[in-house]
Amino acid sequence: MTLTITLTSEIEEELLQEAQRLGMSPVQYSIQAIVQHLSETRRRNETNALLESWLAGDADEQQDTGEAVIRGLEAER
């Protein structure tokens, strides 16, 4: 997929500086930033869905969900 976006001069300069600081091309850095953002959004959505199911479920399901949340939090450390 090819994507063309228009950046403000301030965002462009920040992107260029950060890419240079990391030793990456602006394209590589942009791809990395998008992938990281999507990954964080996916994790956040999964956590929200898990918590919502926990609140809607019975006591046994809530216990299982709580344990899954704790495991997920521990895995991110």
Image (cartoon, rainbow, N blue to C red):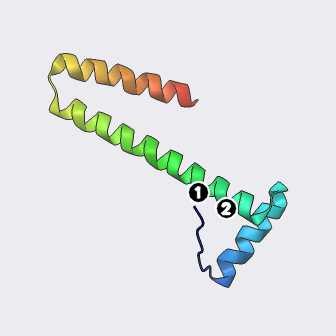
Q: Residue at x 39, y 27 (%)?
A: 69
Residue 39 drawn at (x, y percent) = 52, 45
User: As shown in the figure, which amino acid type bears the numbered disc 2?
Assistant: Ser
Q: Residue at x 74, y 76 (%)?
A: 13
User: As shown in the figure, which amino acid type bears the numbered disc 1?
Assistant: Ile
Q: Quadrant of the N terminus?
A: bottom right
- Residues packed near mark 2 inside 10 Å, few (<14), some (14 to 19) or many (20 plus): some
Report whether 69 appears left or right of 37: left
Disc 1 marks which residue? 34
Residue 54 drawn at (x, y percent) = 24, 30
* Residue found at the far front of this picture: 1
Residue 3 drawn at (x, y percent) = 58, 69
**Labels 1 & 2 near each other (Cβ < 8 A):** yes
Q: Residue at x 75, y 65 (%)?
A: 26
Compared with 69, 37 (above or below) is: below
Residue 72 drawn at (x, y percent) = 46, 27
- Residues packed near mark 1 inside 10 Å, few (<14), some (14 to 19) or many (20 plus): few
SS for callout 1:
helix
Q: Quadrant of the C terminus?
A: top right
SS for callout 2:
helix
Disc 2 marks which residue? 30
